[in-house]
Image (spheres, grey):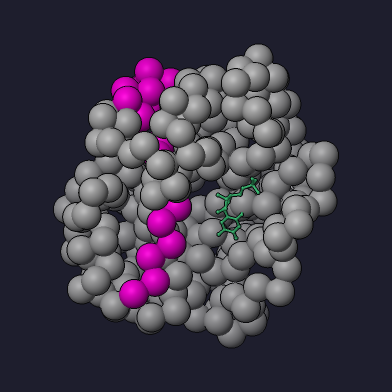
Amino acid sequence: SSFLRQTYGQRIQNHTNPAAKLLLETMERKKTNLAVSVDVVKSKDFLAIIDAVGPFVCLVKTHIDILEDFDYSTIQRLQDLSVKHDFVIFEDRKFADIGNTVALQYSSGVHKIANWSHITNAHPVPGPSIISGLSSVGLPLGRGLLLLAEMSTRGALATGSYTEDAVRMARANRDFVIGFIAQRTMEGVGLQSHSVDNDDFLTLTPGVGLDSKGDAMGQQYRTPRQVILESGCDVIIVGRGIYGKDPSLVDEIKLQAQRYREAGWQAYQERISA
Ligand code: 5FU
């Protein structure tokens, strides 16, 4: 039967990758499938939002390259918050180059992503060599990779056979690829209709909002219920829906995080008891 009927806790045993196990353990322990995407440009706001939402999330998603005052001490603070609040770190880097280049981008530069981010992601567009390049750095460190099988934006080109090929690339690299950025579960995608899918991948889904249908730049939002219950995704990723326009409104940010956490968990409980 489908992995979608199993609890997050039950699914831990379907995984060998340490980052996948850590994420499922964290979700089960904290009873949350909420990830917050912290897309602000000042380190002070970045850390304040993470400290505010920390108790309610399984994962914090970063775009570390948008911090205009970046300094490696911000990473140390992020790691301290990850220990304090018990959440996983996902740098949404969207690697997309040849193996040799992505290995350097992942390990080096000012950000040294592999040193601190449990999970990162890549576009499958270069083919399987992007996975070997990243895994040469990340696998020895116990990191995990998500492939971008679909995107949330209007007119996205990651559809059809591109999405199916992304899933095949993931199945061939189960030690390092732990799941997908996608808008629905990839369970059974690209398989013959009679064959059983033995690969339990995690689906992390951005484009989630309760109060808005999208933005002026192509983003499209669906509700936690649509994402978790109707589309079989595992983690809701919420950015502006939680921190809004003013990162200093800590109480409001906490309230929104609680609201999304509840909506996501309710949809999950309906799914596993269906
Ligand atoms: F891969 C994707 C995608 O398909 N859609 C996205 O929105 C990634 N994202 C990221 O999720 C995007 O870069 C933002 O960091 C975040 C969504 O933020 P929002 O404020 O909830 O729209």
Q: Position of residue 87 (x, y in %)?
A: 43, 30
> Hey, which residue is sitting farthest front in the picture?
68
Q: Residue at x 74, y 43 (%)?
A: 209
Relative horizontal placement of residue 138, taking residue 231 as reference (left or right): left
Q: Please say whether residue 78 is one of the residues in the magenta stretch.
A: yes
Q: In this picture, is 77 found above or below 70? A: above
Q: Is residue 220 magenta?
A: no
Q: Spot the residue most to the top.
A: 251
- Image quadrant where one finds the N terminus: bottom right
Residue 178 image point, x, y percent: 41, 56
* Horizontal relation, residue 27 to residue 117: left or right: right
Residue pictured at 26% horizontal, 30% vertical: 73
Foreground residue among 15 and 41: 41
Q: Which residues are magenta?
A: 77-97
Left or right: 89 with respect to 3? left
Quarter placement of the C terminus: top right
The picture places residue 42, in percent across and down from the top left corner, at: 46, 34
